[in-house]
Image (cartoon, grey):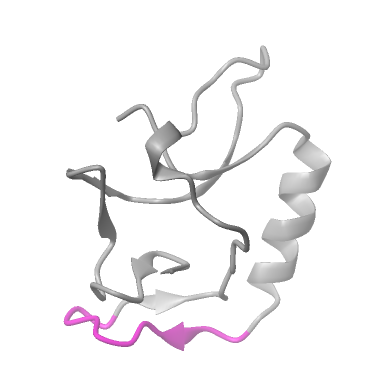
């Protein structure tokens, strides 16, 4: 399970998928021309959808990321639900 900027399993910003280390999962938009890729990030197609989630997260109280040695703070938690099908991941 990935929680925000870290994996609850590894307490880090990375996780192994099909033997490949993946990390730095972020919320972001596609490019202005609509192109772009997502390598595990939560990617928005519409600016208004991204802004809505961003505003909601920024309104939350910051909390310390558990296990962070550098005292990393998080604005909130995004839980992505569903069954991952890592066999379909092209990494």
- In depth, the one of 10 and 13 nearer the eye is 10
Q: Name which quarter of the figure residue 55 lies in.
A: bottom right
Query: Within the magenta stretch, is there residue 70?
Result: yes
Q: Residue at x 82, y 42 (%)?
A: 48
Residue 58 screen position, x and y as percent: 65, 70
- Quarter of the C terminus within the rendering: top left
Examine the structure image and report whether residue 18 is included in the region drawn in magenta. Answer: no
**Residue 88 versus residue 49 in the image, above or below:** above
Q: Which residues are magenta?
A: 61-71
> Horizontal and vertical percent for residue 76?
57, 76
User: How many marks on residues?
Assistant: 0
Examine the residues drawn in magenta and state their main secondary structure.
loop
Q: Residue at x 25, y 42 (%)?
A: 18
Image quadrant assignment for residue 45 = top right
* Above or below, comparing residue 34 to residue 21 in the picture: above
Residue at the image position 76 percent from the left and 37 percent from the top: 47
Question: Nearest the camera: 48 or 91?
Answer: 91
Which x, y percent locates residue 19? Answer: 17, 44
Q: Residue at x 40, y 78 (%)?
A: 73
Asked if residue 5 lies left or right of residue 76, the reply is left
Split into 4 quadrants, where in the image is the N terminus?
A: bottom left
Instruction: Give 41 or 69, whichever is nearer the viewer.
Output: 41
Image: 33 above or below 8: above
Expressed as whole percent of the image width and height from the top left, the position of residue 56 reads 74, 68
Left or right side of 14 for 56: right
């Amino acid at each position: 399970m990935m929680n925000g900027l870290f994996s609850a399993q590894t307490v880090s910003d990375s996780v192994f998928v099909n033997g490949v280390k993946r990390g730095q999962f972020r919320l972001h938009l596609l490019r202005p021309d609509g192109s772009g890729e997502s390598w595990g990030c939560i990617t928005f197609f519409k600016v208004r959808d991204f802004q809505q989630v961003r505003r909601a997260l920024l309104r939350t109280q910051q909390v310390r990321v558990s296990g962070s040695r550098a005292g990393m703070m998080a604005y909130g938690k995004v839980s992505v639900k569903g069954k991952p099908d890592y066999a379909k991941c092209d990494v």
